Image: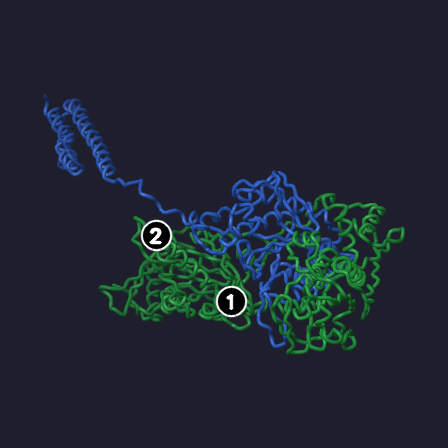
Chain colours: A green, B blue
Amino acid sequence: MKLDFPEGDALCPAFGLRLVTGVKNGPSPDWLQRKLTAIGLRPINALVDITNFLTFDRGRPLHVFDAAKVRGNLTVRRAHAGESVLALDGKTYALDDTMCVIADEKGVESIAGIMGGEESGCSETTTDVLIESALWVPHNIARTGRKLGINSDARYRFERGVDPAFMVPGLELATKLVMELCGGTPSEIVVAGDASAPDHVLNFPLSEVRRLSGLDVPPTEVKRVLTHLGFYVAGQGETMKVAVPSWRPDIEGKADLVEEVVRIVGVDNVPATPFPRGDAAFKPVLTPLQVRTRKAKRALAARGLVEAVTWSFIAKPYAELFGGGDAALALANPIAADLSDMRPSIVPSLIGAAQRNADRGFGDTALFEVGQIFRGDKPEDQFTAAAGVRRALAKPAGAGRFWEDKAASVDAFDAKADAFATLAAAGAPMSALQVVPGGPAWLHPGRSGTIQIGPQNVLGYFGEMHPAVLDKLGAEGPMVAFEVVLDRIPEPKAKPTRAKPALELSSFQPVERDFAFVVDRKVRASDIVRAAQSGDRKAITAITVFDVYEGQGIDPDKKSVAIAVRMQPRERTMTDEEIDAIGAKIVAEVTKRTGGVLRG
Amino acid sequence: MSDIETLERQLLTEIEAAPDEAALEAVRIAALGKKGSVSELLKTLGAMTPEERKTKGPAINGLRDRVATGINTRKGALKDAALNARLNRETVDVTLPVREAPAEAGRIHPITQVVDELTAIFADMGFAVAEGPDIETDELNFTMLNFQADHPAREMHDTFFFNPKPDGSRMLLRTHTSPVQIRTMLSQKPPIRVIIPGRTYRCDSDQTHTPMFHQVEGLVIDKGSHLGHLKWILEEFCKAFFEVDKVKMRFRPSFFPFTEPSLEVDIQCRRQGNEIRFGEGEDWLEILGCGMVHPNVLRNCGLDPDVYQGFAWGMGIDRIAMLKYGMPDLRAFFEADVRWLSHYGFRPLDFPTLAGGLSA
């Protein structure tokens, strides 16, 4: 028997082996069978039962080989690539050179520390038995077990660490049981490697117990507890020397000793100690993004949408439809094929959810979610988005048919209103927002918009869902959606005080005038408003679009857009001439910039 | 009977008989208009002798006043009648329903509500809210938290991995919110008091496990915080969160790689149907794990464990939401069924505060 590892690469620190000849194997006695059955193990035969018994009774896994089936010497070594072994569970495992095996001249007889081989296993006919008691490298056992997918009682113990000092005593105990139950004549124990446990002595300041637990334990009590647990305690004063027993590889430092003391004295005896917040100033504890997130949620719920929480991962084809599907964001081990890729958008999940509700008979639903979306696998690629979906008759004023309204389907403006309400609640600079026609490919090209602050900072999108995308998502419209990225909202400048700017009230009546322009259908209302505004930037305080008309009386490729312009005099009442002059300027600007003609 | 009296009787009769305001106006013009019968009488006063005027004057003026008063009275009566007639026509069926206010129809998900409750409680104790990314490195999710390479504790986390990069490293979905402890200790100096709510992931799915769930952790690092403080904070939290006057908690020694000593905490309760009462009964429910931050974790974050110390705890947000509000099934949290959300969700204006009550 030999250990065959290059210098410094020992996967087996120590290996003990003993031959017992002339045994008579058979069913184990009642007491042993009862004990095994009681913990859910199936008795097999006396030799195997003894190893299982000691695994549980003493935390010492062992292995027994039928000596008659072993050819030549046993070698502990790395497996060779391409080798395989039929294990005791009846399965054949392909091995590689990261794994440690016990082999004879025929080949691999056992996967070290995890599971023995079927071929050299002990049966009723075994007369000569080799008993193995060894030490293995815990992380190698863990890795091998994981690679092979074997969860055995031996692996469970070896990967957590066993008592090295008990390797040989365990072998002796096994021998004794074999002789008692099966008879036979033992040979000498052969040991390769070094099974001695390293000395592990800790300096233990007694004050650590109080420092970490708040518990006052007298030194004599500390000493008593540790001694009873098998520690050797020496020294008097403030710091004791504590030697760790070989069966406690989990004890690393002082904190572990505190745990031993506290768990024996009893955590219930630790007095609950008030933890005052101190004299730190009361300040907001939420970051600006956290504040935006909670405000966005409440604002959307207040608009009648219902908050959903959906998976962060979606099906790859869905991720691709919404601009995702990067290899870096695909899970290597998804739990299901439709939960495979980190979502680039919340919208597909909400569409799916709205459709599931529709299939159950709840067709007019409005759902939202505020949560993470992923553009890459770095922390800065993760964003917090707010998204909402409205389906069928789930209008902002209320869902479903109603006697007061004609039943109108949701439209792009419902989604736009949701998006703007979210941004306003989240503190976006509303007057700086621009809306540009069109959006991402998942939205209807003619009924969607992009919300931005300049082309560099796109905050989000809204509109009617693209029918082809709905089709691919297995959903039925009409559905409208919006999604805005809360991280993209610029932070307002910090102000030294919370005072609001002074209120300016004019004592003069404001004046309102209406204008209707006939323009090409393609002309944007926002351009008309901007042109009108330039009629007089100071006097004009508000412009409202109050009517848009297409149809009879207007060319088919034209529309009529009516605006109400409110002017606020500041120093004195405006004369009719002044008002008319501004009106003429408004008409001139609109005509110049949009080709609009004042409607007679 | 004098002419004046005759005229008065006739005019008053006409006033009384006027069916509407237009007819009444015709009577007024015929009597008090420029060429009206009373106006004509008034003009005759100028040609009279003083004696004649003495007797006729008051009679004619009296006539004018009484006619004018009669017209005004009749005018008021006609106006009232017209208004009444209009009001009688103007009726609506007030039993018709009105739209439910959107704020009544909308809902906040129980997870959001419970996170807001947690925030309210811990903000009051001086805790800030920390967050971190869902996609983490092995280093932050395991190694720096004292999970040794190949230690079985790693495997017990059922980790979702991404595909390996060319350099062999691979990203993962955080299996707990604890990497944010590391991020916090690396980015700010003690004293530290934070809670860390967030999404966590494990590839596990059955009746009581979902591949995505929510955790909240607490972390305290300073130069004197010990298990006694931890016990106090957890007891105060449980009382505040479950809205009861007293709770009984049981602390059991346990193992977590990142704490030493480590404890699991049970809370005493009584189950009645799907309702759970805390602070009474014979049952114990496990609600959280906690412990003193492991010296190796402090060292990994550049903190000397002989100078700095502290504790951490973690629990499932979904789980404590279920315990408090009585939802029977974890999986329903993520199914977006509007029936469930409307039933178990919260109204948007029911913002949890300590002043107004968490769930009041």
- Compared with residue A48, is residue A218 higher up or lower down, i.e. above or below? above
Residue furthest out toward the top: B1
Residue drawn where x is 62% and y is 66% of the image: A89
Give the image location of residue B233, x and y in percent. Answer: 67, 47
- Residue B70 in view (yes/no): yes
- Residue A395 in view (yes/no): no
The quarter of the image holding the C terminus of chain A is bottom left
Write down the residue under mark 1: A340
Give the image location of residue A329, x and y in percent. Answer: 54, 69
- The amino acid on which the numbered mark 2 sits, given as a three-letter code, is Gly
Location of residue A150 (image quadrant): bottom right
- Label 1 sits on a secondary structure element that is loop
In the rendered view, does B187 fall on the left or right side of A203? left
- The amino acid on which the numbered mark 1 sits, given as a three-letter code, is Ser
Residue drawn where x is 79% and y is 59% of the image: A176
Crowding at dot 2, Cα within 10 Å, few <14 / some 14-19 / many 20+, comes out as some
Dot 1 falls on which chain?
Answer: A
Residue furthest out toward the right: A236
Whole-number angstrom distance, CA of label 2 to CA of label 1: 35 Å
Q: Which of the numbered marks, if any, corresponds to residue A550?
A: none
Write down the residue under mark 2: A400
Q: Nearer the viewer, residue B86 or A9?
A: A9
Give the image location of residue A549, x and y in percent. Answer: 28, 62
Dot 2 falls on which chain?
Answer: A
In the rendered view, does A524 fall on the left or right side of B319? left
| Proximity of marks 2 and 1: CB atoms separated by less than 8 Å | no
The quarter of the image holding the N terminus of chain A is bottom right
- Label 2 sits on a secondary structure element that is loop
Q: How many marks?
A: 2
Crowding at dot 1, Cα within 10 Å, few <14 / some 14-19 / many 20+, comes out as many
